[in-house]
Amino acid sequence: MISVVISGPESTGKSTLTQQLSKHFNTFGQEEYARIYVERLGRKYNFHDVETIARRQCALFKRQLQISDINQLVFFDTFLIISKVWFQEVYGKCPIWLHLSIQTFKPNLVLLCLPDLQWNYDGVRENESRRNYLFDCYRKEFDYYNIEYKLVDGFGEERLLKAINYVNEWLSLNHKS
């Protein structure tokens, strides 16, 4: 499986971009599990909830590894780096197993969305004033784990085309048929 993660702060178009890319490349796009989980909670999330979300993200990634062809491109709407930063920022600690999982399930490429889109509150988002700070946190984590990423900015079609070009560029440099 060739894994491409769409990452970035809240309200930066990750879900939209995941859908657009999976449609463009005619492949699977894994939706964001954290959003589904938190929307269904009916209460404020806690440490255990964030851990459940991260474990489920790992399980979804493993499942895609098992069912996907070796050269199949799969897009993931967010992944474990966001969970790690979530743990650190909200609880001041992160489970050790998560660090090991990040090392085990490194994506092939990350498209890191800049917080240049307008903020849209949706009942789950909570960091409007911290988007630039969180962007920097994610970037530092990708650097720390030596995960290749490309910065995606712009609006509408421009943002999509930039992402498509990054994926095509990665495929042409790294993909062996």
Image (cartoon, rainbow, N blue to C red):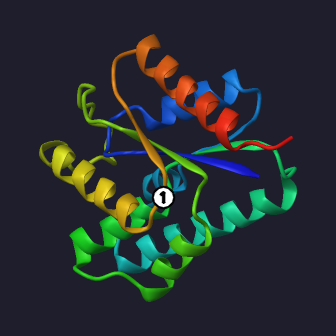
Find numbered disc 1 in the image and state the secondary structure of the residue it sits on: loop
Classify residue 123 by image quadrant.
top left
Q: Position of residue 73 (x, y in %)?
A: 73, 41
Residue 30 in the figure: left or right of residue 28: left
Residue 47 position within the rendered picture, expressed as x and y whole percent measured from the top left: 36, 78
Residue, disc 1:
147
Of all residues, the one furthest to the top in this rendering is 157
Q: How many marks?
A: 1
Residue furthest toward the left? 129
Q: Is residue 126 visible?
A: no
Which residue is nearer to you in this view: 117 or 148? 148
Q: Amino acid at mark 1?
A: Ile
Quadrant of image for the C terminus = top right
Instruction: Please determine whether, in this image, residue 118 is positioned above or below residue 32.
Output: above
Q: Residue furthest bottom?
A: 96
Image side of residue 88 versus residue 28, left or right? left
Q: Residue at x 68, y 21 (%)?
A: 24
Tell me if residue 113 can be seen.
yes
Residue 139's x, y, as percent?
Answer: 31, 53
Instruction: Give the image location of residue 120, x and y in percent.
Output: 27, 31
> At x 55% / y 24%, what residue is drawn?
165
Q: Is residue 18 above or below residue 67?
A: above
Q: Who's the residue at 48% across and 57% down the image?
A: 34
Q: Residues within 10 Å of mark 1 (few under 14, many from 20)?
A: some
Q: In the figure, 131 relative to 158: above or below?
A: below
